[in-house]
Image: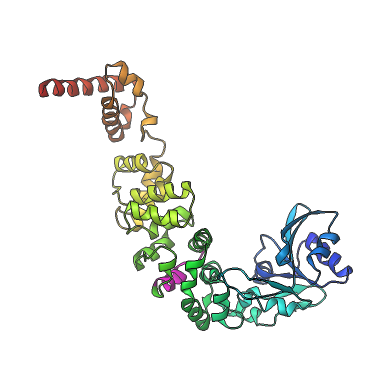
Amino acid sequence: MTYPDYIDEIICRLEQAGASAYIVGGSLRDMLLGVPPHDYDVATSALPEETVRLFSDMRVIETGLRHGTVTVISHGQPVEITTFRIDGSYTDSRHPDSVRFTSKITEDLSRRDFTVNAMAYNKRDGLTDPFGGRDDLKKRLLRAVGDPHLRFSEDALRIMRAFRFSAQLGFEIEDGTLAGAVAGASGLADIARERIGSEFIRLITSPSPLRPLELMAEHGIFDYVLGGYVPSPRLIRAITDMPPRDIARIAALLSDTDRDSAARILRELRLSGKQITGTLAIMTGARMCVQTPADARRLIAHTGIYAADAARLSEVLGSSPSGAETMTQRQQNTPCSLRDLRINGKDIAGLGASGKLIGEVLNTVMERVIAEPRLNDRQTLLDMAKQILDIQQSKGNKNK
């Protein structure tokens, strides 16, 4: 296996100082899978203070010194370097109450979550794999290190990570590991909602989310993720027909809820305002039927930049016939919203309208332009607006 020169330099510097050092965790797992890692993690027998001293010529960020982690910026790349450690007891279902540093890499690996993440490698020693992680990679199996019930009781977020890794890697979850995750699911109630939301978004945007989501529905995990809402099998299948974007796929999963319920779930997951707005827009558009170009323009008027995903979901869920997404994309540059009109509220006011009447006239004009885009000519629209205004005022006078 090969890795970048800057990682080799870090490991060599630690070894020259008399310490052991290895590539560990997800970076090593990805290397063994033939996937280029996004970043690299290094584990070492050097104490954190020694690591800081050894890399004093580089920028060093004391990321989690108490837990043995420092980040070294090498050739512009951040590398987390963590001292071999043994975790103490967990009382918050998330973090160890204490850690004890050790000189043995096998003891450090024994505290990790899954066998595929519990390996270490350097050029001197080759692969250190005390729990059979490489075999599990070949079997495409996700298995907890040691006792699954203990692993998940220590850190309940590992339950979400199990389903996320399964979706990300396309691996089956080993039976005992799944049983441990299900048994410890109540621990998710103690986990910060933004951490659950982050893992869930990564899960649903992974290449293989179908089986993990089905297992979550079957075993009651959604009670701790979506506040008791359980997406139907139809909706779980639907996300695989959606592009791997967060708002597109979560909109599909929440399609059986009303707008207020969906907004509550999204807020509880601590999603951003942009994610919430986009998801709700797609859900709205997915319930519209797009059969004609005018229908597509109405959908764009309601969903804006999310129109293509909304039309796609409308197709997937059967609200619209096949071809709705393509039709919608073709209408993207036609007038579909008030800002596309060649007149505005000041023009309507100049015709003698005021208050709510200005909006009513503009909306009526907009509906006509959506039906016939060729009408979006300034003089044509002014004539149309005056005609609508005259009718409205005539009705008002009769009512008097």
Q: Is residue 218 above or below residue 242?
A: below
Would residue 323 be visible to someone looking at this image? no
At x 28% / y 28%, what residue is drawn? 365
Depicted 17 relative to depicted 338: above or below: below
The quadrant of the rendering that contains the N terminus is bottom right
Is 364 one of the magenta-colored residues? no
- From the viewer's perspective, tell me whether residue 399 is left or right of residue 238: left
The quadrant where residue 71 appears = bottom right
Q: Which colour scheme is used?
A: rainbow
- State the residue in front, 96 or 284: 96
Q: How many labels does the image show?
A: 0
Q: Position of residue 244 (x, y in %)?
A: 49, 57
Q: Name the dominant secondary structure of the magenta segment.
A: helix
Please state the horizontal and vertical placement of residue 274, each as a whole percent of the image. 47, 46
Q: In this view, does 323 lie to the left or right of 60?
A: left
The answer to which of 291 and 63 lies nearer the viewer is 63
As rendered, which of 356 and 389 lies closer to the eye?
356
Q: Quadrant of the C terminus?
A: top left
- At a point 37% along the width and 33% down the height, the residue shown is 335
Q: Can residue 155 be seen from the camera position used here? A: yes
In the displayed structure, does residue 397 sit left or right of residue 351? left
Which residue is found at the position 51% from the left and 76% from the top?
172
Left or right: 12 in relation to 370: right
Which percent across, then down, holds residue 152? 55, 75
The magenta-colored residue range is 207-217
Query: Which quadrant of the view contains residue 30?
Result: bottom right
- In the rendered view, tell whether residue 100 sits above or below residue 264: below
* Picture coordinates of residue 52, whole percent (x, y): 81, 60
Q: Which of 29 and 262 is in front in this view?
A: 262
